[in-house]
Every structure is written in structure tokens, then in C-alpha cells.
Image: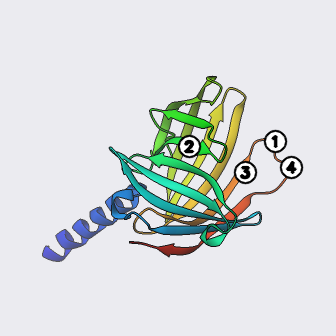
Amino acid sequence: MRARIIALGLTFMASMAQADIAWNVDRIGAGSTMVMSDRAGELTHVKRGTQGALHVFDVFAGQGGAGGFAGSYKTNARGDVVETVAFDGAVTRFVPHRCNRTVGQCNFTVVHPDGFTEPRTRVTTEVNGGLQYREYGLDGLMTEGALHLDANGTSKGGWQRQKNADEKKRRHRRIVLALK
């Protein structure tokens, strides 16, 4: 009987661990670096720190930022993006957030740099080792993809495909993770 209770408890704990697709950005210190690579090249993400309750990341082209500043983004503590800033300073906001790490159907609004607001719906499903998603906008399906996550919820890689893209899935993978 005792072995059954322990086994049931371990099974419950394992299913709870899989259910959390959050990116635990609180565990990532300022100066931490993550380099992601796809067929277009490499992008280096550097955590700058926090701004109130938000976590701020800068993105640089190339490994180690050799290609210059590419933009930045802010996330909440779960890793849901609330704002992006393009290299030219154009700000896009996601209200309440982009639903990157929210399981199920999640509705949000994109506020584009020119002030145009666009309703979006993201449907995210937990899968073994990560998540899959589909994002819908005014014209239907906008993008779909999947992420493989490590124990911290940080992307190890995955794929993405844009609506009306003639190309196949764009695969990406993490090649460097240096936490501080």
C-alpha cells in the first residue's frame, strides 16, 4: 500500500512538472546570455535586468552581438512578452501579454507602433518536453510553431512557420546558454 501511495505521488508530481511551461526569468540574472541559431544566422539574447516587475532582454545579431543591436523585449515573470522594441526604436505592445507561456486559448491585443490595434488569439498546448502553439489574427492563422524547453522553461529549440510563407518550417536551436 505504501509503495502505491509513493508511486501515485511521484506520478502526480511528474504531471505537475510537465504542466508548467513558464519561462522562469526570475532565475536568470542580469548579464546572462542565450544564443539561438537558425538558417538566417544567430541572435544573442542578453538579460539587461528588471524594470519594475518586468524583465528586460536585449537582442543582438550574431553570436556575442557582433552584428549590432537588433532590438529588445520585456516579459513578465512567466516569460510572456509584453513589449518589443525594434532596432529603430519602434515599440509594439501586447495587452495584457502575448500569451507565449499560457496553456489553452488566450486572447490579447497587439498595439502596433502606428497605434493600430489588432486582436489576436493564441492556442497553446503542452507536449512532452515543451509546447506547441497556433496564433490567429484578423486574417485567420498567422503563425504556428513548437518549443522544446529545459527544466527552467528556457527554449532549447523548436520551429516556426508564418502564414503564407513559401518556405518550410524555420527550425532554430539554442547553441549557448550562460547564466549569471
Mark closer to the observer (1, 2):
2
Viewer-closest of 164 and 114: 114
Callout 1 touching callout 4 (CB < 8 Å): yes
Rounded to the nearest whole Å, what is the CA distance between mark 1 and mark 4?
6 Å
Residue that label 1 marks:
164
Q: Secondary structure at mark 2?
A: strand
Residue that label 4 marks:
166
Taking the image as shown, residue 127 lies to the left or right of residue 70, namely left
Residue that label 2 marks:
84
Residue that label 3 marks:
161
Counting from the top left corner in percent of width and height, residue 52 is at 33, 44
Quarter where residue 117 is shown: top right
The residue positioned farthest toward the right in the image shown: 166
Above or below, comparing residue 172 to residue 103 in the picture: below
Callout 3 touching callout 2 (CB < 8 Å): no
Residue at the image point whose x is 58% and y is 48% from the top: 133
Q: Earlier in the sequence, mark 4 or mark 3?
A: 3
Counting from the top left corner in percent of width and height, residue 171 is at 70, 63
Above or below, comparing residue 176 to residue 162 in the picture: below
Taking the image as shown, residue 102 lies to the left or right of residue 122, namely left
Residue at the image point whose x is 62% and y is 41% from the top: 89
Counting from the top left corner in percent of width and height, residue 131 is at 52, 56
Q: Secondary structure at mark 4?
A: loop
Amino acid carrying label 3: it is Arg
Does residue 128 appear anywhere in the picture? no
Does residue 163 appear anywhere in the picture? yes
Rounded to the nearest whole Å, what is the CA distance between mark 1 and mark 3?
9 Å
Amino acid carrying label 2: it is Thr
Rounded to the nearest whole Å, what is the CA distance between mark 3 and mark 2?
20 Å
